[in-house]
Image (tube, rainbow, N blue to C red):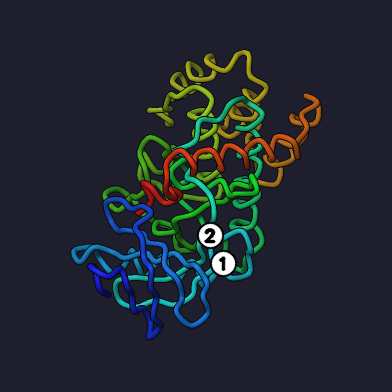
Amino acid sequence: MSDQGLAFEVGGKRYVDGEQIGGGGMATVYSAVDIETGEVVAIKVYREDIDSRALNSSIMMHKRLIIHGDIPRLHCSDDKSYVMDYVDGVNLRNLQLSDESSVLIVGYDVAMCLLNLHENLPDPIIHRDVKPGNIVVRHDGVSVLVDFDFAHVDVLSTFRGSENVGTPMFWSPEQICGRQVKPESDIFSLGSTMYNLLTGQYLRQPHVRLAIEVALDDLQECRSRDIIARCWRVGTEYRNAFFLSEDIHTALEESGVDIEGSRRALADLVKESKHDSGADNLYEGVG
């Protein structure tokens, strides 16, 4: 890879016209053009001091997810980087959603992503880091889940104590207590994500019932209160993401929300955000 010319060589393939579009503590993400096909791709380059297990885990997850069209497809990789589909959109962390309907639509899309991860693969995959910064709203108003560095196959997800990963502000009770994660852990984190999008606040003690009840008091006037409560296992918890997606869809329909119109509004918001920022910011904070 050439830093000065932003040209890359990964897995024997060459990419040019590279431009940084985001990154975080582990890696930097660039957009670039495949010199053979002309396709725009995203290239994630890990820092030299990062354990190769994070890269290898992410590559393994992307290979397992090749059947799911809403997950960026892996193109190729080497010992410190990999190339994947470029997602034309904006990181949810950089968008100001205008109303509760938009939050519910984002929640529905992410629930469908989780349904595919948890139910439609030979071995269920737990994302373990569902949060606004790992959700991209595409140019068509559809939200997708990204960044699989911390994802793990369910049958192997026995991480405990100091081995725990993810973002503490969106952890499930299993993560904060160092217990084995499960599909319901991602659902819990999606509830915390929706709560954050609606209130700007965080559920800081997900393992404490009183903290959950206080947080739910912030949602007394929201249609999504009961949905988030079930994500947080108050009352009847969701057995899987299918029932969550059904509840969100029902809430939107019963409220008379024009779902397609709301998606168009999200698409317009993405367009405005990209225009205002002057650059792509879909991977800001990812890595």
Q: Quadrant of the C terminus?
A: bottom left
Query: In x, y percent, where is residue 9?
Result: 34, 79
User: Which is nearer the N-term, disc 1 or disc 2?
Assistant: 1
Q: Nearer the viewer, residue 157 or 246?
A: 246
Residue 33 shows which numbered tag? none
Q: Secondary structure at mark 1?
A: loop
The residue lying at 31 percent from left, 67 percent from top is 53
- The image quarter containing residue 99 is top right
Query: In x, y percent, where is residue 28?
Result: 31, 58
- 154, above or below 2, in the image: above
Q: How many marks?
A: 2
Q: Which residue is mark 2?
A: 125
What residue type is disc 1 on?
A: Leu
Q: Which residue is mark 1?
A: 65
Q: Is residue 78 left or right of 185 when viewed as pictured?
A: left
* Local crowd size for mark 1, using a 10 Å CA cut-off: few (<14), some (14–19), many (≥20): many
Q: Is residue 234 left or right of 147 when viewed as pictured?
A: right
- The image quarter containing residue 27 is bottom left
The residue lying at 36 percent from left, 60 percent from top is 19
